[in-house]
Amino acid sequence: MSFQRTDGLVTLGKRTDRDAEPASSEPAATAHGPRVYVETYGCQMNVADTDMVTGLLTGSGYRTATSADDADVILINTCAVREKAEERVYNRARELAAHKKRRADVRLGIIGCMAEHLKASIFERAPYVDILGGPDSYRRLDAMITEARNRPADAGDPLVDVKLDKRETYEGLSGVAGGDGVSGFVTIQRGCDKCCTFCVVPLTRGRERGVAPREVLRQVRAYADAGYREVVLLGQTVNSYAWEDVTFAGLLRAVAQVDGIERIRFTSPYPVDFTADVIDVIANEPKVCQFVHLPLQSGSDAVLERMRRNYTVADFRAIVRDLRAAAPDVAMSSDILSGFCGETEEDHQQTLQLMEEVRFDSAFMFMYSERSGTFAARKLPDDVTEPVKKRRLREIIELQERISREAHQARVGKTERVLLHQPSKRNPDQLVGRTDGFKAVIVPRTTDEGVELAPGQFVDVVIERATMATLFGKVTAVR
């Protein structure tokens, strides 16, 4: 199974066989199974789902396709949070449909959030799609693919399975087989109950439901047994996690006890539920990284209230203050949404001022786009003009780029512990890794002493230079 991780945002069906065996117990891929290629658009939740789908299909006998050119089945795992991401998927689906013209047995599927959100209109804009599968349909994906391959190429309407399942957490499955061998994703919570007025996630992924701690630990141990060095705990509002008497802080401490896992990350927390015990774990548990992604969205109380974010700017400042008091070297990133309904120039300036004050190491910055079905789309006028949205977003980006450049420059001369992840796309003689604070670091593949480095190794790196987004350095020790 091959997939392309595409940062559409960054950098975002029915199930009955609840007692299914873990993916690791399924048969290995055969030499004659259909070849599958998956592209992923969106956040880390989408990447985690692709890893899981990869494991499911590989375990059912599917083979690896190195590109769409070689595939019998092409799947696009999608995001619905931003209109721009949806348009990219439509454009890409149109390109990939050319493979169906070249070979009549090729089948094309759209899965994930966009399939659920736009189920009524996708086939109108993309009539060449054979399969639509929502984020709760993945256990049935093999059956859907088989049925689609057994139907004539011109069968008409696609096979559709987008029903949300309020109990589905994909217990018993794992992304080990589909991951990169270094950093594994463990989804500890699916869906969302926050219902921000601009957000489509509760509509596409359903209401919040947690994964049992024993299941989370089973998946973490599976990654450790497979040689992974890092796990990332995922949830739409990950720190809202609760299971009986287990809190998110308690779960972090339990995961830290798993031998073999050296780093623990999590995303994305919700400011309202950022409690003192979570801050204490970040500050005092060595395996939990000194990095927090804390979505702000706006620096204006009036805008936050219209968004129904349930916190104020003062609340956000207090979280940042407490975090930095407990963990002075903690790195922070955020989400900034520009041009939301009713946003005034004063609101925009307040956002810029708060960004300057907090000084996020990085941020994901977007222009508001109305999402059908949300409260904002139904009740709040999208009254900020396109030119004003673009100008405000440009100012936000320019400010953040300056702050990010300064934050990266401040690391020059320091020694960082780096986990190597993958070869550099630009230069095969270099490797890309991450610091504890999630900053990308590029190092030579071979040290001055002639030692060949590989993904999955920890190395000490003296940072020699920096750009706005990347650190460059020299390896001084291999751990």
Image (tube, rainbow, N blue to C red):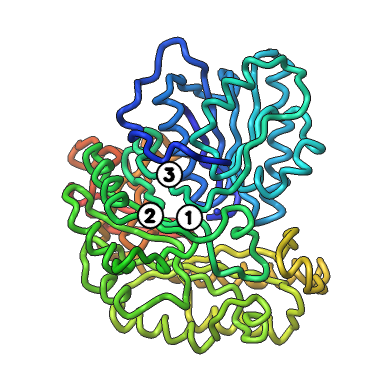
Residue 143, image x and y in percent? 54, 25
Q: Which residue corresponds to mark 3?
A: 170
> Secondary structure under badge 2?
loop
With 88 as the anchor, is 404 left or right in this view? left
Q: CA distance from mark 2 to mark 1?
A: 8 Å
First reached walking from the N terminus: tag 2 or tag 1: 1
Along the line of sight, the residue nearer the viewer: 20 or 459 = 20
* Residue positioned 40% across, 68% down in the render: 239
First reached walking from the N terminus: tag 3 or tag 1: 3
* Residue positioned 43% across, 23% down in the render: 60
Query: Amino acid under label 1?
Result: Arg
Along the line of sight, the residue nearer the viewer: 62 or 478 = 62
* Residue count near mark 3 (Cα–Cα under 10 Å), binned few <14, some 14–19, many ≥20: many
Q: Which residue corresponds to mark 2?
A: 211
Query: Amino acid under label 2?
Result: Val
Query: Amino acid under label 3?
Result: Tyr
With 282 as the anchor, is 123 left or right in this view? right
Per the rendering, the mark at residue 65 is none
Image quadrant of residue 92? Answer: top right
Image quadrant of residue 355? Answer: bottom right
Q: Which residue corresponds to mark 1?
A: 190
Q: CA distance from mark 2 to mark 3?
A: 9 Å
Q: Is residue 438 above or below residue 44?
A: below
Q: Are marks 3 and 1 in contact (CB under 8 Å)?
A: yes
Residue 56, image x and y in percent? 43, 31
Q: Are marks 2 and 1 in contact (CB under 8 Å)?
A: yes
First reached walking from the N terminus: tag 2 or tag 3: 3
* Residue count near mark 2 (Cα–Cα under 10 Å), binned few <14, some 14–19, many ≥20: many
